[in-house]
Image: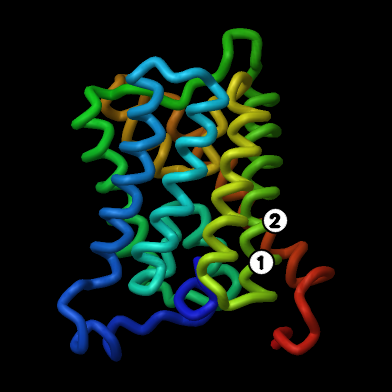
Amino acid sequence: MNKKHGRKCFNPSSSAGHMRFHPAWAEFIGTAVMVGVGCGSVALGASHPVVSLSFGAAVTLVILVVGGWSGAHINPAVSIAFWRDGKLEGDILYTYIVAQASGATLAAWLLNGAAPTVPAPQVHMVSLMAIEVAITFALMLSILVVVDRTERRSVVAVAVGAAVALLALVAGPSTGASMNPARTIGPNLVAGHADLIPVYVLSTVIGAWIAVAVNQRWLRPKMLQD
């Protein structure tokens, strides 16, 4: 999600020849690590605050390690948002989404479907969608605000990881705090909760899409505006 690779159009045709590690593999591995660490903490019986911190720490780690290859989106909603913002090419978007979903599914399979994204019994579908739209909006907006103002990957990594941890802490008990279609697709497919996938995917993509519009209209520094 750094400015160099997450904000600017990443052109694999110009870079893949110079490195044998395709950026989609970075997305695959990064998403697998994020789901493995986060959902793995649930499988180990960690408390909700620890689980939230685990997801946030995993996101920070992945951005630091693979951000230089792919931008470390590790989230289809984030990739779609960058495409919507004109910072990611369409053909790269498709490979990123496939890689992210595949990495999440592999991690979920290794964890035997631990921690699928499911709402609390008292949370109705409308509330579920509203909460997921809101927290994904907040996450994506925080990403855009940070990467528009700094190229330092360490700053982006800590800021985004902290946002993930905080939002997961707040919304986790009600909706599971997906904020990420891949985080839901993998565990839910393996655990047998595929019926909820469309709701989470739609909600998170809408939230990220709105964040791009808000940032473009009101928050983006003038020197970065097209």
Looking at the image, the residue that sits furthest to the left is 20
Q: Amino acid at mark 2?
A: Ile
Q: Residue 117: x, y in percent?
A: 46, 26
Query: Position of 190 compared to 72: left or right?
Result: left
Residue displayed at 69% across by 75% down: 149
Query: CA gap, disc 1 to disc 2?
Result: 17 Å
Name which quarter of the figure residue 125 lies in. top right
Q: Secondary structure at mark 2?
A: helix
Residue displayed at 51% across by 43% down: 56
Q: Which mark is residue 159?
A: none
70 is higher (above) or lower (below) than 191: below
According to the picture, the residue beneath numbered tag 2 turns out to be 210
174 is higher (above) or lower (below) than 25: above
Q: Nearer the viewer, residue 90 or 150?
A: 150
Q: Residue 163: x, y in percent?
A: 63, 47
Residue displayed at 31% across by 37% down: 36
Q: Residue 154: x, y in percent?
A: 52, 66
Query: Position of 120 compared to 54: left or right?
Result: right
Q: Could you tell me if the residues under marks 1 and 2 are in contact, i.e. CB atoms within 8 Å?
A: no
Q: Secondary structure at mark 1?
A: helix
220 is higher (above) or lower (below) than 39: below
Residue displayed at 64% across by 38% down: 166
User: Of callouts 1 and 2, which one flags the residue occurring earlier in the amino acid sequence?
Assistant: 1
According to the picture, the residue beneath numbered tag 1 turns out to be 146
Query: Position of 37 compared to 140: left or right?
Result: left
Q: Amino acid at mark 1?
A: Val
